[in-house]
Amino acid sequence: GAVVSQHPSRVICKSGTSVKIECRSLDFQATTMFWYRQFPKKSLMLMATSNEGSKATYEQGVEKDKFLINHASLTLSTLTVTSAHPEDSSFYICSARNSPGQASREGAFFGQGTRLTVV
Amino acid sequence: DAKTTQPPSMDCAEGRAANLPCNHSTISGNEYVYWYRQIHSQGPQYIIHGLKNNETNEMASLIITEDRKSSTLILPHATLRDTAVYYCIVRVASGYSTLTFGKGTMLLVSP
């Protein structure tokens, strides 16, 4: 299957600072990327969907000004957690899909995840 | 997307077959059954998917009942590395549809 690379895998930051997480599709063009958040022992919760070159669509309850998503190219999407608080500590996972008109066999390809700890 | 119901946890002895059930009684005619798994602190990994026929690949087999209201993922010879949360998801196989994760089944493979 295709490869999605997420960086960093782990990050610790101080309260009030911003953290950027990158998601790259290494061998295909990702027209759509998804960002998920996962709290301990919970399932993945979709935060937002982004299409290349357009604004992201956020799920209900997700603050768009706090979780900035940029999908400026077909191989890169970034999630910036602004003014981070301890309650933002979580496991963030991106996934990518290629052509919007056809589903990939796997449905979507996932990154390795980023463990964010805000202290 | 239709909802799914899975047992919260299952145990399996190493080397034995692991049979993970999933109920999706409200599945629509154009919805596929997808299985993913998530090993601790990693992103989800695709396993297999199917519409109505049974499917097999190098990782697992998928058995879908004739009425499509339930399915079973079979890992024929479970190893310790198969310990993970297994998610059964039903979705339309369209590039626009998202993946909605339920709680999944925590499969623990023991020596």
Image (tube, coloured by chain):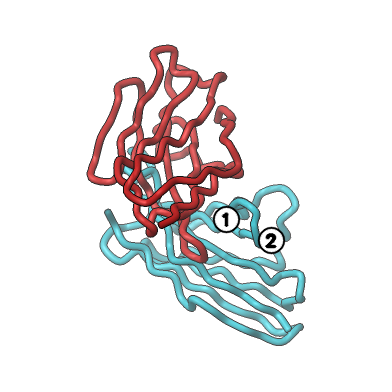
Chain colours: A cyan, B red
Residue A112 at what x, y percent from top left? 44, 66
Q: Residue at x 40, y 18 (%)?
A: B65
Residue B72 at what x, y percent from top left? 42, 30
In depth, the one of A110 and A69 nearer the eye is: A110
State how far apart marks 1 and 2 are (Cα). 9 Å
Q: Work out which residue is located at the far bottom of the displayed protein and give it.
A: A14
Residue A50 at what x, y percent from top left? 52, 55
Q: To which chain does the residue with label 1 belong?
A: A
Question: What amino acid type is highlighted by mark number 1?
Answer: Ala
Marks 1,2: beta carbons within 8 A: yes
Q: Residue at x 59, y 30 (%)?
A: B3
Q: Which residue is identified by label 1?
A: A56
Mark 1: which secondary structure? loop
Q: To which chain does the residue with label 2 belong?
A: A
Q: Quadrant of the C terminus of chain A?
A: bottom right
Q: Is residue B83 at all visible to an observer of this figure?
A: yes
Q: Quadrant of the N terminus of chain A?
A: bottom left
Q: Which residue is identified by label 2?
A: A64
Marker count (numbered): 2
In depth, the one of A22 and B19 nearer the eye is: B19
